[in-house]
Image: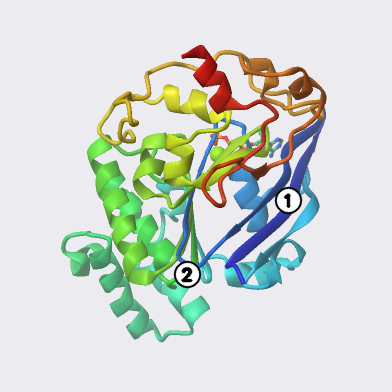
Amino acid sequence: MPLLDIQDLTVRFDTGEGTVHAVNGVTYSLEEGETLGVVGESGSGKSVHVLSLLGLIPRPPGRIAGGRALFRGRDLLAMSEPELRAIRGAEIGIIFQDPMTALNPVLRVSTQIVEALVCHRRMSRAAALRRAVELLDLVGIPEPHRRVTQYPHEFSGGMRQRVMIAIGIACEPKLLIADEPTTALDVTVQAQVLELMRDLKKRLGMAMIWITHDMGVVAGIADTVQVMYGGRIQERGPTRAVFHDTRSAYTWGLLRSLPDHGQAPEPDAEGRRPRLLQIGGQPPDLFQTPKGDPFAPRNPWATERCQQEVPPLVQAPGGAPGHMVAAWYDLRAAKEKAA
Ligand SMILES: Nc1ncnc2c1ncn2[C@@H]1O[C@H](COP(=O)(O)OP(=O)(O)OP(=O)(O)O)[C@@H](O)[C@H]1O
Ligand SMILES: [Mg+2]
């Protein structure tokens, strides 16, 4: 049984201007210990899809219009708020982008970690405080004995991010969901946090869903990559396969827009590195149900069928097992023809 098994997740927002089709039939599963990197441009449904699993979308205007999401066999989408509260921060750890909004500014770091452990793990306060110090040490905060009694504003940006990670992993979750956790950090600190996460994953054996705009970060941390567009999965598969045997024109566009810094994926067989290029065109109109492939208007390889029918997500022909793509066009053939 997979750790998380999502079937046809569909999320809508009913707004004054119309219904936003934010997540449209997302289906995938995550194994124990697996790290999934989720990428896609702004508005592609990355955050909403995980927030809806955790019962964290505002309702209204949000609503779950369909689907199920079995976490260790139990449907998260059917759970009551108290049931979800017992899972959030305990079996599922959460790290968000902005530590200042996620941390409580008026509580000492020790209090925030101790509360989580006392509440979810039924630890004594003394044991929880010892554990809080260990956790700060584990995430690489120097002098954890002294630092644990400080308030969030007494930490630098990078150290605050580490505090959030410490809280996220305090209860040793089976699954850690991180939404752009390193975006606000400078490149050096970002690299340190990534190294820390790789290390923790090994030590704790937890699965992760890691949301980011940065394909370079994904290349460095993910076993599996999932590329989202217009609330749908366009391509998904083992990281190497998605980077080196790309089947979706949208993924291809994202890879070509990669800045050529140290974390970019290795060059391909011909020694080419993805170039710095923006994807032209407008993001999809989420107020409408698309008639065809939502990426078709921006896809130079789109065929007549792409304009007419939404492509299902299927195994990429001749691709690695589990390499899935939603495309009517054949990207490999099109690129070969152009070369
Ligand atoms: N509370 C809300 N009310 C109305 N629409 C919303 C609400 N929250 C999200 N949406 C819409 O849902 C869609 C998906 O948003 P989401 O936040 O998941 O994008 P994202 O991929 O995380 O983008 P980003 O990279 O900018 O974080 C967007 O069109 C967004 O405007
Ligand atoms: Mg987001």
Q: Is mark 1 within 8 Å of ligand 1?
A: no
Q: Closer to us: mark 1 or mark 2? A: 1
**227 above or below 3?**
above
x and y, in percent, of residue 14 in the image: 81, 37
Q: Residues within 10 Å of mark 1 (few under 14, many from 20)?
A: many
Query: The disc labelled 1 sits on which kind of residue?
Result: Leu
78 and 336: which is toward the camera: 336
x and y, in percent, of residue 266 in the image: 30, 35
Residue at 48% across / 81% down in the picture?
121
Left/right placement of residue 85 relative to residue 192 reads right
Ligand 1's quadrant? top right
- Tag shown at residue 315: none
Left/right placement of residue 248 relative to residue 112 reads right
312 and 92: which is toward the camera: 312
Query: The disc labelled 2 sits on which kind of residue?
Result: Pro
Classify the position of the N terminus by image quarter.
Answer: bottom right
**233 above or below 161?**
above
Q: Quadrant of residue 68?
A: bottom right
x and y, in percent, of residue 273 in the image: 33, 25
332 and 247: which is toward the camera: 332
Residue at 59% across / 67% down in the picture?
2
Q: Residues within 10 Å of mark 2 (few under 14, many from 20)?
A: many
x and y, in percent, of residue 194 in the image: 31, 49
Left/right placement of residue 249 relative to residue 126 reads right
N-terminal of the two: label 1 or label 2? 1
Residue at 65% across / 62% down in the picture?
5
Q: CA distance from mark 1 to mark 2?
A: 23 Å
Q: Quadrant of residue 40?
A: top right
Tag 1 secondary structure: strand
Residue 73 in view here: yes
- Tag shown at residue 9: 1
Residue named by callout 2: 173
